[in-house]
Amino acid sequence: MKMKISKKKFLSIIIVIILICIIIATYFTGLIIIPRSTKLSVTPSNFVIESGSNLVFTARLESDNFVLTGKPLYWSASEGSFDKTVGEMVTYIAPTVVENKTVTITVSFQGDREYQGVKVTVTGIIYPRKAVKTTLTVNPPNFEIEVGKSISLTATLLPLSASPELISWSLEGPGDLSARVGTSTTYTAPKEISEKTTVKIIVNFPGTSEYQSSTFVCEGIIHPAGVILKKSTTLTIEPTMSTLRPSEKIVLSATLKDSEGNILPDKLLIWELEGPGDLSTRVGVSTTYTAPKEISERITVKVTVKFEGDEYYSSSNMIAIIEIIPVSVKLEEIVYVLTFDEMSLRKVRIEGPIKIHNIEVTKVIAENVDIKGFNLSRIGLSSSTAEIPSVELYLTSLMAYSRELGKTLTIQGNEKVSYTYETLTLEKGTIKLIRLSAEKTSLKEVKMIGEYIGGSEPYVPSIINTPEAELLEGYSFTASSYNELVEKVHLFTLGKGIVKDITIVHPITYHLDRVRNSYTFQSKWTARASNSTFINAQAYIIYINFKVLNLGPLIFTGEDMPYLMGMEKGYGGTITDGSIHVVYATLDQMFFEKIVIDIVLT
């Protein structure tokens, strides 16, 4: 028995067969594209970060072991924020927390016609920022006055970065205070008393989320009219606050004055130490503090200088705070970060890993390198263009887009690599390195910027040293100001200078004593060259030390007027054993021969 198929059913079968054939044909001819699988990785893959701190995250999207660049990668966080939410590299800003908090960072690629979407989540812990200890002192710390008289009181809050506007004053006993908030007030004794009376003035800093509270009690004695009184005194310390590494030293100097501002040079001053370390002497107007050789964590010590008073003058004291920071070699803290807009390399060889300073790095050798938008951290050096022939770079990481490769080139110092390129052009890149050496270097439109840290000496300068320099084509020293350094710097201008065996040091710690014209520092990042030439330079200098002709060393800080005839303006001269400390400088051009940029591990 034959089955009859209706025309309608037959037509449907034919259409299905045709569609199947079309699908098969289009698949094999590539008209239908099945998205390829992708893999997404994030660095770091886990983290621990302090409340309010920043952390850079880098994402890497791959397919079939090929790095995909230019794809939109989206970032989100359960807590905190980002500097941007789309990109391969973002900066995460941790939120403020009062207890340990677990957060998740998610990065995702939503997929497109060619590649499948993918998502990765990493987990981290945010721990609360530990409140910094504070210390309040009042000058004078105690006093004696007659009825109806007044005395000014000044409070000092350490560290200087705390909020002094939160300081409050209260009074126990008779009399009046002119102000109840702020860093100063005036106490006025009552007009009539029948016998000696004691008052207490309590100064309080309530504390914040970043700084602990502190209190100081100033005691005063009010005498009836006609009594012979002791003069009140005030003590000051220079510096009031400093930061040291283990085994470092710092000189502390004290000045005792009476209520009229007269220095009292012959009074016995006693020094006391609270915390580890040593003082060179316990009596005198100065002492040298030496930090302990080994510490496992950051510690704070107090050095107090006291005048115990005598029959004419009342007692006084003052405190200096010193923070000791342990030496811990963390790679991210010691490397230079070289960023650039464009880097063109010729005849390039990339090999790794090798070890420098016991750190695994990748070595990059190039016959010539041209850089646009050159910016080297740690020594604050930047220029519009840089030309560096015969260069060697020792890097811990590299990330930049390569025109020749058509992708982002990513290299880690501990990875095994071996590449050779006739030419290599990199764009918008970041290189973290621990050493750079070159036969010559030419920089144009140069800036050198000191590190801003705040406080009474708000900048860590770059220290430039040379055994011999020629000052040519016009130079001058003029008193000047730079930001907060009002009349505390000299503006040095120079048409042309040739410097031999130059070293440029950026300290990790630095202290300038303007009273004694001396300084202490610990170096970490250095650049040195056999010869260098400066063209049209302007530099703001806080410290100068050099010799000229047969004269001895000439030493002064930015507060001192130049005192050598002919130094204020000139058109030629040679100096020796020169050292200048620069907080900001600009140059039209800068040339180096046989330059080496390196780190100093202690």
Image: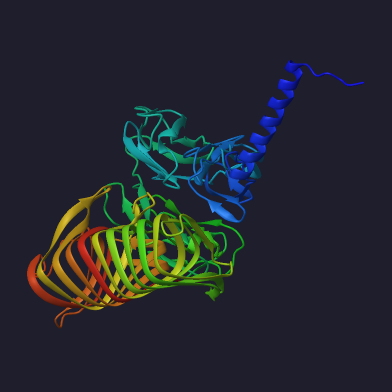
Quadrant of the drawing holding the N terminus:
top right
Residue 411 place in picture, x, y as percent: 52, 62
Q: Is residue 80 left or right of residue 574?
A: right
Residue 565 place in picture, x, y as percent: 8, 70
Nearest to the observer: residue 185 or residue 263 = 185
Nearest to the observer: residue 60 or residue 34 = 34
Taking 357 as reference, is 84 above or below it?
above
Residue 218 place in picture, x, y as percent: 45, 40
Q: Residue at x 74, y 25 (%)?
A: 13
**Residue 102 appears anywhere in the view:** no
Determine the residue located farthest toward the right in the rendered image.
1
Q: Is residue 503 left or right of residue 113?
A: left
Taking 278 as reference, is 487 above or below it?
above
Nearest to the observer: residue 101 or residue 138 = 101
Taking 435 as reference, is 87 above or below it?
above
Taking 494 as reference, is 139 above or below it?
above
Q: Residue at x 42, y 56 (%)?
A: 429
Nearest to the observer: residue 396 or residue 208 = 396
Residue 356 place in picture, x, y as percent: 52, 75
